[in-house]
Amino acid sequence: MLERFLEKCEFDSLDDFRKNYRVKVPDHFNFAYDVVDRWAEEEPDKPALLWTNDNGEEIQFSFKDMKNASDRTASFFQSIGIGKGDKVMLILKRRYQFWFSILALHKIGAIAIPATHLLTAKDIVYRCDAARIKAIIAVGDPVVTDHIVEALPDCPTVECCVSTGPMIPEGWYDFNREVAAAAPFRRPLRPNRNEDLSLLYFTSGTTGEPKMVAHDFLYPLGHIITGKYWHNLHENSLHLTLADTGWGKAVWGKLYGQWFSGANVFVYDFEKFKAADLLEIFHKYHITSFCAPPTVYRFLILEDVKAYDLSSLEYCTTAGEAMNPSVFEKWKELTGIDIKEGFGQTETTLTIGTFPWMKSKPGSMGVPSPEYDIDLVRPDGSPCAPGEPGEIVIHTDRRRPLGLFREYLYDKELTEAAYSDNTYHTGDVATRDEDGYFWFVGRADDVIKSSGYRIGPFEVENSLMTHPAVVECAITGVPDPIRGQLVKATVVLSAEYKEKAGDELIKELQNHVKNTTAPYKYPRVVEFVDELPKTISGKIRRVEIRGRKKPKAS
């Protein structure tokens, strides 16, 4: 399969990969037709998706199954008026109907808008109004459907709703019944253009209302690197990415790059995460490749990992936030496997990664992907020296990378603020070492300037997280008339330390940071809280923490 899209598929070194990776871009590329249906034609029985849930159910879908199901789904969607360019919200958790639906929307040229089941009625109204959504396909969970029903009177653009059951609200279509009875699919006469929009994501909104990130039909081609060269997948891989289908990480790890590589995508559909259950899944199904946020690895290493047979596990990756080196080292000790970090945004595919030919450096994101022309720059746009923090930018003057978003939909001003003069400003700050490895510092807005020093929140968080009292923490800056800003730590304590919260523990944590990182970085302000404010995607809302009244400095 990959030979159709790459000038060269196998590389013997990082240098070879970076110099010779080239994608052959077809006219009118459509992932559903050109990859999924092509697999179905050439190897119809090849495993594509192994779906399981926490009730013990499992279904193995072949590529022929995926073609047939997406064809019927596309026919059903056409019958209810969904056509080219229409925007359809998918709130489907980890149900297998998500894959049927997103492929069907690709086939008819519509725009898929994956969304989380955690949305409230207010969130749904905002999204429907902002994107002018025409239809909603949702899991038949009473909480989800109740929120949608509550929102609908304020969503005038929504013409129809579909439920996968068991709850089918009055006036909604029954997804499973309608798809089973659908007429044969008739492929649209007008093929999509490469620049047509196919996918729309609402960002998590850590500093304001979510932005609408629009991707075109070439976006999946940008994920060849994600699946083949970051996840290191092959045709016998059984790959598990732990992500709800409402987030961008799902198409990073459960769809595009995996099926370019011919891997079998493993889906574990659960309602409540339990680390021990996940280890049992590894053991039972012989997972070969795994990707999850660092938080998941933190929970896994607290279990008796050695009690499970993980001998089938070949490769592990992580993204979504920077990983604490202590977690990396413990996972390596327990499994013998390095965790390969990567970095990207909703606006991009994998932009920086630790690839198979590289030595892992715990805590480093890796090096730039050959798809992207990346630099670190100062506020004046000049390049940073090694070790100097700067903003990660993507230059597009030589060519536009596959996977880079086209625009923030309906917001030209916001688009131009982030992407102009052939440069996309990510808003993320990193350093680069002498070997070219990138190290995450924080969002540009989160970097703390204190007494002439620039302090990245992540390095202080890393230090605090190695103290047994700390379950979770966030580092922010608070105004100070003398130093400009003070470093503040907002800390969630472990159960055994909660009764010890007070000045003595504050001093202990401050000294711990002084002893494990540069002394000037220690938090002069420490606040203990029961939980950190987060977005619905689980990202810490530092903007909310910065808005709180400052506790007394120590």
Image (cartoon, rainbow, N blue to C red):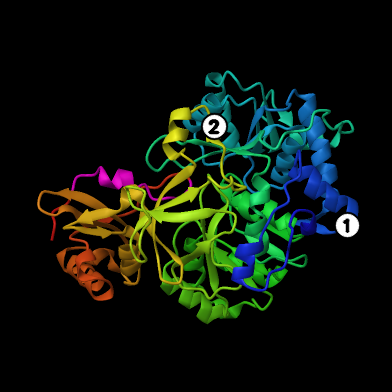
Identify the element where label 1 is drawn. Answer: loop
Q: Position of residue 182 (x, y in %)?
A: 85, 32
Q: Toward the viewer: 113 or 149?
A: 113
Dot 2 and dot 1 residues touching (CB under 8 Å): no
What amino acid is found at the position of numbered circle 1 in the picture? Glu
Q: Could you tell whether 322 is left or right of 2 in the image?
A: left
Identify the residue at horizontal 24%, vertical 76% (top origin): 515
Q: Main secondary structure of the magenta part?
A: loop
| Label 1 environment density (alpha carbons within 10 Å; few <14, some 14–19, many ≥20) | few
Q: Position of residue 471 (x, y in %)?
A: 36, 64
Identify the residue at horizontal 52%, vertical 20% (top origin): 154
Identify the residue at horizontal 26%, vertical 58% (top origin): 454
Q: Position of residue 469 (x, y in %)?
A: 31, 69
Q: Toward the viewer: 10 or 148?
A: 10
Identify the residue at horizontal 59%, vertical 59% (top origin): 370
What amino acid is found at the position of numbered circle 2 in the picture? His
The quadrant of the image that shows the N terminus is: bottom right
Residue 255 appears in the picture as rendered: no
Q: Is residue 167 above or below residue 47?
A: above
Tell me which numbered mark, 2 or 1, is placed earlier along the sequence: 1
Q: Which residues are magenta?
A: 537-550
Q: Which residue is mark 1?
A: 43
Identify the element where label 2 is drawn. Answer: helix
Q: Is residue 341 above or below residue 31?
A: below
| Label 2 environment density (alpha carbons within 10 Å; few <14, some 14–19, many ≥20) | some
